Image (cartoon, rainbow, N blue to C red):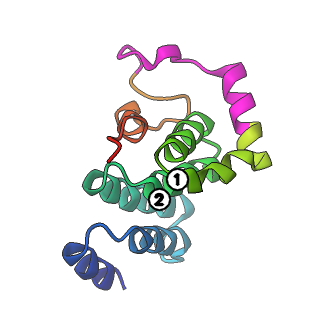
Amino acid sequence: MRSTFEHLLHRQPSLCKAWVSWAQMEKRCHRFNQSERWHRCRAVLQRGLELNPSSSCLIQAWGLMELQRGNWLAAVMMLERSARLDDRCVPVLRWQHVKTAKTTDEQTASCTGRSNACHKSRAGVPLTLMWMANNAIDR
């Protein structure tokens, strides 16, 4: 199945739904332990976002994945960025889990200003990846 996604996305790298489906497949794959599944899911979304830096769909998918992991800083940053890129992503910001994450992040955030002195967010997500999601170019 991975080879099918790789082949498709090599030919059509802008197919957001294919990237998200592949990431979901990796998250659910029973061959690997839970930590490895999340790592693989994140890696697929990162690869898709590297090729499509302004994809609101991919940024939102990654934000939702981080929300599921409890990585609130990354989740909130990515979900807010996806909403700025595409109005169709705004309703997710009204979900109770997202509101809770935002409130919790505001109360406990370290790395205020996302300075270079802080190499990782509180959740362990590299800030360069969150910066990439938060600063995608609007097209």
Q: Residue 83, relative to residue 119: is it above or below?
A: below
**Is 44 on the left or on the right of 124, as rendered?**
left
Q: Residue at x 56, y 51 (%)?
A: 87
Q: Residue at x 19, y 77 (%)?
A: 11
Q: Amino acid at mark 1?
A: Gln
Give me the disc on residue 57.
Answer: 2
Give me the disc on residue 60.
Answer: 1
Quadrant in which the N terminus is drawn: bottom left
Q: Residue 88, relative to residue 128: is it above or below?
A: below
Q: Residue at x 62, y 21 (%)?
A: 109
SS of the residue under disc 1: helix
Q: Residue 20, relative to residue 30: is it above or below?
A: above
CB-based contact (under 8 Å), mark 1 and mark 2: yes
Q: Residue at x 51, y 18 (%)?
A: 111
Magenta residues, as a range?
A: 101-118
Tell me the chief SS of the magenta region.
helix
Q: Residue 70, relative to residue 3: is it above or below?
A: above
SS of the residue under disc 2: helix
**Is 85 on the left or on the right of 80, as rendered?**
left
